[in-house]
Amino acid sequence: MNRFMEVLENVLMPVADKLNNNRYLTALRNGFMVALPLIIFGSIFVVIANFPFLDQWISEDAYATYQDTLGPASAATLSIMGLFVIIGIGYKMVEQRGGESIYGGVVALAAFLILTPQVLDEVSGVIPTSILGAEGMFLGIFTAFFAAEIYQAIVKRDWTIKMPDGVPAAVARSFSALIPIALTLTVFLVVRIIFSYTPFETVQNFIYTLIQEPLTVLGSGLPATIIAVLLIQVFWFFGLHGQIIVNSVFDPIWYALNDQNLQAFQAGEELPNIVTKQFIDTFIVGIGGSGMTLAVIIGIFIIGKSRQMRELGKLGAPAGIFNVNEPIIFGLPIIMNPLVIIPWLLAPVIVALVTYFSMATGIVPKPAGVIVPWTTPAVLSGFLATGNHIMGAVLQLVNIAIVFVIWFPFLKIMDKQYYQNEKDEAA
Amino acid sequence: MKRILLACSAGMSTSLLVTKMEEEAKTRGIETEIWAVAQDKAPSEMKRADVLLIGPQMRFMKKKFAVTAEEVGIPLDVIDPMAYGRVDGKAVLDKALELIGE
């Protein structure tokens, strides 16, 4: 067993290292972080705008006015989140190399807008907001990568205008960015022109049909989701931060699926996706943290006889409510502990299946696409994520019960061992 | 004044540790500044720290941080998983002081 663990650890560490230090994935993750506060702001207002029962208390007109008044909050943030992600990625790409990062952000944004159709229903000078949201996100991500790379390559070659001494630094800086930005954007303009002669007409269409759609369809399926959930657990079992590693690959897909649901939710249509960012964050991870350890803490309080368990429960509970569970993972311990590998891997998979099918059958509403901050306590987060629906909270309680049952015998064995050890030591 | 920097994924779980370490330092009468940051902030924060301690779940970042740590000339290490899990401020403070070379 030990040898096997060693081998696995030796395989996983380099993977984690590679994924986490890959400069595109790092920029992608940090780019999403730039967008996150805005996305959460927009989500909060979607939640407020769809306050439960309000439509029954006030007249239809008043309700519509109420929703319209709050609409811009999410329209200006959530619905165009692709823009913030693009600026974030461009910024972080250039920042990594120690360049003038804000130019990385704006050059990525401009490059993306160059590739974007600027016509809607034959009215020119219009950019459809749908394309600035989830639909344009994949193209946005690639555009930001390429734009930042080209920009940096030109800066590195030093093809810049140099101002004579005595010119204020701020002026000199904007001139030094002029040629790299101009050349980068020219490249994208040429790309746009080339695509206008293809059947796809725009790069947006090309990416959407060739990459984004197949990828999101794959990512929304149950098998890919189970694999992602299992991978997160396996990484954590070796004490490596599973979400940071796995999410950097899956986030673009999950966010795109999320946004499709949000648009349908706001339009009052049927929600297209079950698996979304919130499916993972709220119903699989957000019940005490990875592996849904809130149920483990509850188990510790109910059956814990050993001092070690009880102390850990007290330590872990306050943080666990807000889905921070490192004390439990490292303290129980869960990492490298062959005894808990079965519940640790099994529980999230069972919960994912239960969550998936309860949503597929319509017992629980699908995630509405609002982003609930990951530190939101369970029950509340389930309610908010399903668009203010009580069944979302109920499902989280059911999930806690499932995890509890799966863990129970294993916790019992562990507690007995610890208790025995403590008695032996005291004797 | 000892400046101890902790880094983890979002700076959340390490901030639990900060409180415990501060308590311990206070009882020992050591003047410290201890703070926790998210991993991507660690390289820029290292400049004003005497030592960097990394949460064990981010230990794959050690190699990357080591480059910056060498530039600014501070020691770094990964926090012991058990001490981390028990939020053992005493053990982690000892480790930090040992690395600083006290």
Image (cartoon, rainbow, N blue to C red):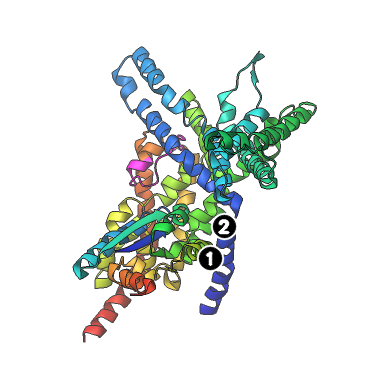
Residues at marks 1 and 2 touching, judged by CB atoms closer than 8 Å: yes
Q: Position of residue A291 (x, y in %)?
A: 42, 57
Q: Which residues are magenta?
A: A363-382
Task: Give the number of marks.
Answer: 2
- Chain bearing mark 1: B
Q: Which mark is residue A148?
A: none
Residue A204 among magenta residues: no
* Apparent side of residue A301 relative to residue B41 in the rendered image (left or right): left
Residue at the image point whose x is 36% and y is 52% from the top: A323
Magenta highlight on residue A365: yes
Extreme residue toward the bottom, this view: A427
Between B46 and A390, the residue placed more toward the observer is B46
Q: Position of residue A310 (x, y in %)?
A: 25, 67
SS at circle 1: helix
Q: Position of residue A182 (x, y in %)?
A: 68, 32
- Can the viewer see residue A332? no
Identify the residue position indicated by label 1 in the image: B63
Crowd class of label 2 (few under 14; some 14 to 19; many from 20; radius 10 Å):
some
Q: Position of residue A89 (x, y in %)?
A: 56, 42
- Mostly what secondary structure, the magenta segment? loop
Q: Badge 1 local density, few (<14 within 10 Å), some, or many (20+)?
A: few
Identified by mark 1, the residue type is: Lys
Q: Is residue A85 visible?
A: yes
At label 2, the amino acid type is Asn
Q: Is residue B26 above or below residue A46?
A: below
Residue matched to label 2: A21
Which quadrant is home to the C terminus of chain B? bottom left
Q: Image quadrant for the N terminus of chain B?
A: bottom left
